[in-house]
Amino acid sequence: MDAYFDKQEHKDALKAELKRWKGTRFRYNMAGKASPLIGADCISFPIALYKNIGLIPADYQTPPYISVRSGKHELYKIYSGMDSMQGLYKIWESEKTGFVKENFMFGDLLVCSSGLAVHHCIVITENGYGIHCWPDQGVAKIYLGLVKVTKFARRVYRWYE
């Protein structure tokens, strides 16, 4: 089984899609309505990215926005959604080993959570960075070595063919 983004054409497709989202602002509860330059929230953004390049079926229903005061049950909804996607596999979990950004590759999906409050998704890009959608920033680059990332990193998923 090969990682989907090992192929250059797949990597190029995601890079092109990421460029389309530059300047997109954060909007709460976008769910299935996330769209480049219109708006997205942190959960709907990566799902829309992967939909737009054909990894997720177009009719997949994005879960509603995960509330800041949502609790662990909402995190488990995110996990359930990710675990049920065909071709997407959990490759790392925080309970087993520490977060080492060099272990992950372009296109991987990082799920972060404080446990009881904020739940967040980051698409891992290159050179220790990722792209996410965050309030007051919209779609933006983030360094994966930041304490706020490494401390709250919970799972990483990878696409396989």
Image (cartoon, rainbow, N blue to C red):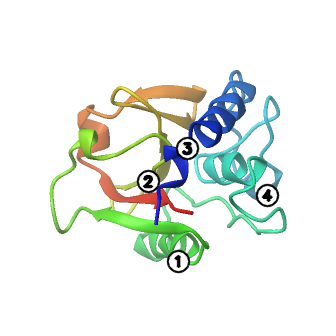
- The crowd level at tag 3 (other Cα within 10 Å; few <14, some 14-19, many 20+) is few
First reached walking from the N terminus: tag 1 or tag 4: 4
Q: Residues within 10 Å of mark 4 (few under 14, many from 20)?
A: some
Which of the 4 image quarters holds residue 142?
top left
Whether residue 136 is visible here, answered yes or no, is: no
Q: Does dot 1 land on a helix, a strand or a loop?
A: helix
User: Of residues 73 and 123, which is closer to you in this image?
Assistant: 123
Which numbered mark, 1 or 3, is in the foreground of this view?
3
Horizontal side of residue 62 vs 59, given as left or right: left
Q: Secondary structure at mark 3?
A: loop
Q: Determine which residue is flagged by label 3.
A: 7
Residue ID for mark 4: 32
Task: Give x and y (percent) for residue 32.
Answer: 79, 58
Which numbered disc covers residue 14? none
Residue 99 image position (x, y, % from top left): 22, 49
Q: Which residue is painted at 80% across and 41% down in the image?
A: 35
Residue drawn at 15 percent across, 60 percent down: 97
Residue 56: x %, y % from top left: 71, 62
When the figure is inspected, residue 122 is found, relative to residue 54, above or below; the finding is above
User: Secondary structure under badge 2?
Assistant: loop
Question: Between marks 4 and 3, how big is the CA–CA gap?
Answer: 28 Å
| Residue labelled with disc 1 | 80
Q: Name the residue beneath numbered marker 2.
A: 118
Which mark is nearer the camera, 2 or 3? 3
- For the point 76% across and 69% down, the residue is 61
Residue 75 in view (yes/no): yes
CA gap, disc 1 to disc 2?
Answer: 17 Å
